[in-house]
Image (spheres, helix red, strand yellow):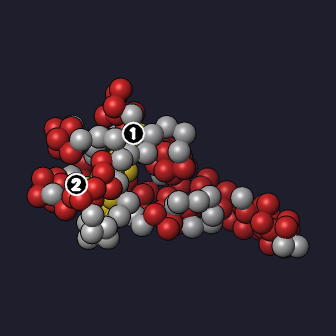
Amino acid sequence: AIRIVADATGEAEAGTAMIAAFDARLARIAAEAATEAGPRPSALVYQVGGSISLEGTLADAALTAAGFRNAGRSLAHARGAQVPLEALVAHPPDLLVLASPPLAYRTVVADNLRHPALRALTQRVESVELPWRLWLCGTKHVGDAIEDLAAARRRLARGATQ
């Protein structure tokens, strides 16, 4: 997407530089994750209505780039890309990623984000709130989301060694 927009606006050189900086950032994060022993920790992007991000999505790519295994693969089963809150509480990931703040949507479909069980879960497991604006599209801001996820992975690793 960056290259297409850069070419269309006559900024091909700036686009190439932006892509190179992004690639270097990803390489640094991947190298850091590769030094950690043991299996990759699990993470789940949990959204309004119990929606989750499955394999092949930008969110999945961001989780993988940050050194996580997408827990959505094991939680979704045949249910598609929605996971009941009960299933999440029963089988929590190592990291819970909330794509929206609990009060961002004042609708019934967002009740799962305000539920006491989810609040309790965020006290038991590492959690992080990453606004969709960082990783809804393939822009340079995805790098910020990946950096935040990598920081959460480091916190998990420190907790496991203490």
Q: Is residue 37 visible?
A: no
Callout 2: helix, strand or loop? helix
145 to the left or right of 39: right
Q: Name the residue at 34% across, 41% down.
A: 82
Q: Name the residue at 49% across, 45% down.
A: 60
Measuring from the top left, give residue 126's x and y in whole percent: 25, 55
Crowding at dot 2, Cα within 10 Å, few <14 / some 14-19 / many 20+, comes out as some
Crowding at dot 1, Cα within 10 Å, few <14 / some 14-19 / many 20+, comes out as some
Task: Name the residue type under label 2.
Answer: Asn
Q: Residue at the top extreme?
A: 78
From the viewer's perspective, is residue 143 above or below residue 96? Answer: below
Measuring from the top left, give residue 130's x and y in whole percent: 40, 64
The front one of 89 and 105 is: 105
Asked if marks 2 and 1 touch (Cβ < 8 Å), the reply is no
Task: Name the residue type under label 1.
Answer: Ala
Name the N-terminal-most of marks 2 and 1. 1
The front one of 96 and 22 is: 96
Callout 1: helix, strand or loop? loop
- Which residue in the protein does label 1 denote? 81
97 to the left or right of 111: right
58 to the left or right of 10: left
- Which residue in the protein does label 2 denote? 112
Measuring from the top left, give residue 125's x and y in whole percent: 21, 52
Q: Quadrant for residue 22, please give it.
A: bottom right
Q: Name the residue at 53% across, 45% down.
A: 57
Q: Name the residue at 34% across, 54% down.
A: 47
